Image (tube, grey):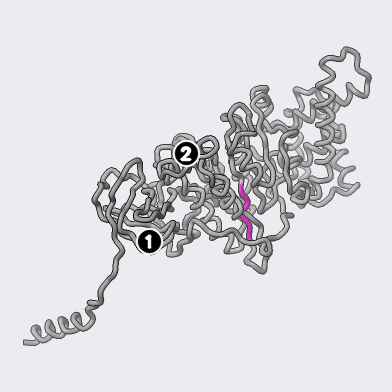
Amino acid sequence: MEDSKRIIESLRREIENLNIAPKIENTGVIIELKDGIARISGLSQCFLSEMLEFPMGLFGVVLNLEEDVVSAVLLGNYNHVREGDTVKTTGQIISVPVGEALLSRVVDALGKPVDGKETPNLSKRYPIEKIAPGVITRKTISVSLETGVKAIDAMIPIGRGQRELIIGDRQTGKTAIAIDTIINQKGKGVICIYCAIGQKESKTARIISELHKRGAMEYTIVVNAPASTVASLQYIAPFSATAIGEYFMDNGKDVLIVYDDLSKHAWAYREISLLLRRPPGREAYPGDVFYLHSRLLERSLRRLPEFGGGSITSLPIVETQSGDVSAYIPTNIISITDGQIYLDTDLFYSGFRPAVNVGLSVSRVGSSAQTKAMKQFAGKLRLDLAQYRELAAFAQFEGDLDESTKKQLERGKRMTEILKQDQYEPQNLARQIIAIFSVTQGLTDDIEVLQINVFMGKLLQFMEAEKKEIILELLIGEKLSDDLQARLTAEIDQFKKIF
């Protein structure tokens, strides 16, 4: 009897709590499906960039609103989807999960882990598209973001909040510079995001392995949309990476995002646009391809403390064909960014690596994003190198040269040698200053050109082992006093005798 009463009471509670209010759903039917684009009839209430739910948990995003149909791009494998299937609106703009738990993880363009580890518990989501902050919230770029590459930190300085394009032909070391920069952020409080767009999975796996080996993965997130995925995921990947970066910036942190590369991003967008039957323009790209990249890169900034602080620095990579920087996508991104690092194929194959062409590279932020110590000697380095290149061009036709010209040419050769650097071996500020100081002050003029890098390697080892007090003073980044310069000169001269 007691049991039956308990059951009746339980049923009564269930009936009282039963919600039988009508649930309204906006559903439609797929009337056409091809190449990952679905045309859907009946979705009268949907809006642009809304997530749509397809059968078996597949999602798509609305990109075209027409008079009687909407066109959506499917985000993933759509082999099980058929014409006539029902599609539901979700009422949500496309977004990605964000949070600290993403650090050291590899995720896809939708923020789902693809590294075989457990799914992180993330309650917060950020929309992938966001209007860039206004000018009033932005702070002057004045804090250096050191890449660890001597040629860049000395002559093409990058500041936190800057957008610096890395441009050049394929296989010239564009990604290597970006990865060196990520490795160099160890212990500097910068969160790094590497966004691979349309890359071979083997290349991305090598990069992830290298980041693990160097201890850089603990502050890095990899957003991977490889060449094997559908064009829609390659299209949204950089926006997802930026949304993840904005979460950390909103928490007052400095973020570095590498977009590798935006040429393939433009190709993915062109493919989607042509399938959506949007009219093609120059080189078959849609008319809004400039807007595509400008609204992405404008989200990089250094923010004033009263608006939350933090910064996003972006290093977009663009591939050129036979060094043609005047093509459509390269010129677009050059005009959006705050400077470019141009990598030269001839320099690369002549053994000068990283193959940075200092003449064609520029940082529009300039020395305001440089430490005082680096600024003190970098100006002379750039000027002397420019003069050396002019002289070297004439010297090959001139037989008899005067002593001062010969001396300038010899020093120029040593400057060129000192800027060579191995991959995945970024140099800290102290190491860079010692190298640049030695060569600009003429302290290496009596060292054989081919021996310069051997000499410099051993000198740096000696300084770090025996003269730690000088290294610590240099790492502060303040202008070198006359006393410090004299001590540094004395130590280098002393070491030359041993060498």
- Measuring from the top left, give residue 198's x and y in whole percent: 47, 39
Q: Nearer the viewer, residue 322 or 494?
A: 322
Whether residue 277 is visible to the viewer of this picture, yes or no, is yes
Q: Of label 2 and label 1, which has the lower sequence position?
A: 1
Q: Residue at x 73, y 28 (%)?
A: 454
Task: Please report the bounds of the magenta region as a residue range.
Answer: 310-314
What is the magenta segment's predominant secondary structure? strand
Residue under label 1? 46
Residue 301 included in the magenta stretch of the image: no
Q: Quadrant of the C terminus?
A: top right
Secondary structure state at the residue bearing disc 2 = loop
Q: In the picture provided, is 456 more to the left or to the right than 227?
A: right
SS for dot 1:
loop
Q: Nearer the viewer, residue 480 or 235?
A: 235
Instruction: Identify which amino acid the numbered label 2 is placed on.
Output: Gly
Q: Are marks 2 and 1 in contact (CB under 8 Å)?
A: no
Q: Can residue 431 be seen in the rendering of this structure?
A: no
Task: Give coordinates of residue 401: x percent, y percent.
Answer: 91, 17
Q: In the image, residue 32 lies at what x, y percent?
A: 30, 46
Q: On the image, numbered disc 2 is attached to which residue? A: 198
Q: Is residue 264 left or right of residue 16?
A: right
Vertical relation: 450 (above or below) 475? above
47, above or below 447, in the image: below
Image point (73%, 46%), residue name: 364
